[in-house]
Image: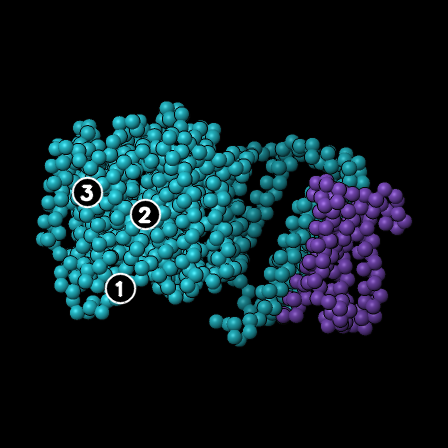
Chain colours: A cyan, B purple
Amino acid sequence: MLLAILLGFIFSIFLVFTGKFFKGKLSILASGIPLALFIYFAQFINRISSGEVITQENIWVPSFGVNLGFTLDGLSLLFSLMITGIGFLVFIYTSAYLKNNKYLDRFYGYLSMFMAAMLGLVLSDNLISLFVFWELTSITSFFLIGFNNTSQASRKSAITALAITGIGGLSLLVGLLFLGAITGTYSITEMLIMNPEIAANPYYTLIVILIFGAAFTKSAQFPFHFWLPGAMKAPTPVSTYLHSATMVKAGIYLLLRLTPVLGDHEFWNSTLVIVGAITMVYSAVHTLFRTDLKGILAYSTISALGILVFLIGQGTVEALTAAAVFIIVHALYKATLFLVTGIIDHQAGTRDTTVLRGLRKVLFPVAIAGFLAAISSAGIPPTIGFIGKELTYESTFHFGNLAVLLMVLIVITKILLLYAGFVTGIKPFTGVLPERFENTRMPSFLLWAPPLLLATGGIVFGIFPGLIEASIVKPLVNAVGGNSEEIHLKLWHGVSTVLWLSVITITVGTVLYFLIKPNHKLEQTIAKLEWLSPHSIIIKMWDFFFNFSKIWTNLFQNGYLRNYVSTIMVFMITLTGYGLFKTATYSVDYMSFSRITVYEAVTSLIMLIAVLYTVFTKSRLAAVAAMGIMGYAICMLFVIYSAPDLAMTQFSIDTLTVILFVLVLYKLPKYLTLSDYKMRIKDGVISLAFGTIITLLILEVLAEPINSEVSDYYAANAYVLAHGKNVVNVILVDFRGADTMIEISVLAIAAIGVFALLKLRLKKSDQR
Amino acid sequence: MKTIILRTASTYLLPVLLLFSIFILLRGHYSPGGGFVGGLIASIAFVLHSFARGLDNTKELLRMHPGFLMPIGLAISFLAGVTPVIFFDMPFMTGLWYPEHLPVLGSLGTALFFDLGVYLVVVGVTLTIIFTISESA
């Protein structure tokens, strides 16, 4: 299984070297990877449906409890099949859609990397590896949205998507760490039995909020939904694959996966129902106001994700079954509609639904696919969409005391989704073919076969729901902790309230489709309310943040070195001073002073004179020389207090520092202006305060009892273990040798930095 | 600063100082000294020479850019560190010692080579920085 997941990564690395071959006619060969994986996962169907759970454990970082543990159960199987199956069709489609694109190999690289990450995400049993794969999907999505990197809009969308899903990723990490800390394990399988303990934990609500933060951003729930319409800037295969069929369902997957661990709790259920309901109605209404086919599809995808969250929130076996079926339904019809839209865009050159008409005459097989997908999305029998809709209604109908309100909301959503499905799947193909599209040519087989295949799947599964009942739906419901025995998927449920609601949905939806024609006026109407939307609000906060940090940075990093130094000093004085003031107690014991020797007195006197001279001299060189004297005096102190090694080094360093200073300053002009009195007083106060604070700090440190264990160890073992009598040097080259190793590396880097800064002269041609 | 006295003296000072720096390097294990200080003293020797005779003369004397001493030194230090790992299956930076007592050097071990690496890196870094700055100043 590990190999199956890594295959995508390996392939993308392989593409780096062999990309040339995959750009031309051979590009279709790339689809062999998802096909092979699809077959690999399909062979597990029998074992999974008999209730088996396949696990595999690979050691990764055992010391942190992080392993690459993989579990294949009903839930991961459905997602794996979706990822590889739709992946296969998208790979084929891409080979024709992006034919002759300069960066086709790169595109395949990102796509297969994404596929691998997504597989890793749905198969991980370990929460940490799940997080790693989760982030990888965000990152690959960023590259894919920004694939058309010469367009500013697509770069902006990519960064928005990355920012939103990235915040969600952080929230996920914190949530998972909390979960791991509470349960003492990172394995989901082991957490399954701990639900009551976790729910009783005081941090339960916080964990759930953090997990929701991740799931809602990834699955584009209100108010984080806006990155998804933006992500439609990506090439259509990406929208199909990532932003409708798989990646946006990662949040749904996470919620389903954690339902047995965190679910069955008031807070979990009601939050999900409320957020799901808001999202589904909000974005279903939005579809009315769009004229771009992809825009409509984006909002209807968000709405569908809302329905899924809504169903998971209900948490009953019925609702989970409905969610399972609806995931399949949605993957089949929405991917089809996206692919169809892609073909229209590719062949007819526009996605504007107000002008697209009558394309069935030129794109017949595409029209069939669009039609089938539209009726599946509308939930008209005998499609699987109908079964999905019935199950959704059924479970909502049985949902406690709020059933009526929720029923109304879901019916409204479904009506609007029917409208959206019809507008995208049927409208472009019906009516009279306008003149401008008469020359539209039939696309290659590779383009229209994938959507047709998916759309047919919707019908086949609808007529024979048994195909997915035992193999997918039951194991899935089992995996999320439900009892799957009573599940029977049927096309005909008998006459009931739910059936009547279905009839109402279809009738009203169809009427709506004939009444409202998408037009630009509606789009402009909604654009006026744009400033109220979460998108604009977040963008405004974003701008504010940028401005704020700009002001902040300019305040403290204004390019004057002396301001940097004084800023650092003032901060240090304030913080350390506060700390010392709060904690330390002061008393001076004159009796314990040792006698001052002549050497000490003389050295201190020299230091004092040197300092005063440095401050009051008017020549730079003299100041530097006085500083050098100061340094030598400190060396004298080292000698007096028997630290010869230190003294030697300090002597040499001081000499070199003075030389360096002189080299730099020698060429500068004499002081042009001396700082005025105010400035001098300010600087003087800061330096005196800084010196005082440091002195107090050192006295405070010395007052603490010294733990001499370490130095005793070094002193005792220097000769025994390291054959040296100079303890300082033995520490440097032996006991702490690795430190020295790193320090000299740092020194070398610093020297290279200086060299590069001063010597590097770009050639004229390289300068920009 | 190119006085005759300094120029004449530097001819003799350079070898003496270099010898002194190597003395400091070698004695480091038993008495005050070591690669770091040794390297600094050697750099000072070269800087003094460059003051007396001009940068170009010193560069000519060195024959190569002092920057090359950095990778050489790093490599020597690193090799001294990994030798026990590769040949004796002991942890990184384990000190290995030649059992006999040698004349002049005293006891010989990986630590000395490590210190030699430090010495070369320090000379390389110091001279690179100072030469670069004095050239562009």
Secondary structure of residue under mark 1: loop
Q: Is residue B80 visible?
A: yes
Rendered residue at 83%/68% (across/down): B11
Q: Which residue is mark 2?
A: A245
- Mark earlier in primary sequence (2, 1): 2
Position in image of residue A433 (x %, y %) = 16, 65
Marks 1/3: CA–CA distance: 29 Å
**Type of residue at label 1?**
Met
Residue closest to the eye, A317 or B39: A317
Crowd tier of the residue under label 3, counting other residues whose Cα lies within 10 Å: few below 14, some 14–19, many 20 or above = some
First of labels 1, 3 by sequence position: 3
Q: Chain of mark 1?
A: A
Q: Is residue A32 above or below residue A263?
A: below
Query: Who is closer to the viewer here, A659 or A183?
Result: A183
Question: Residue A454 appears at what percent x and percent y?
Answer: 29, 49
Which residue is disc 1 drawn over?
A442
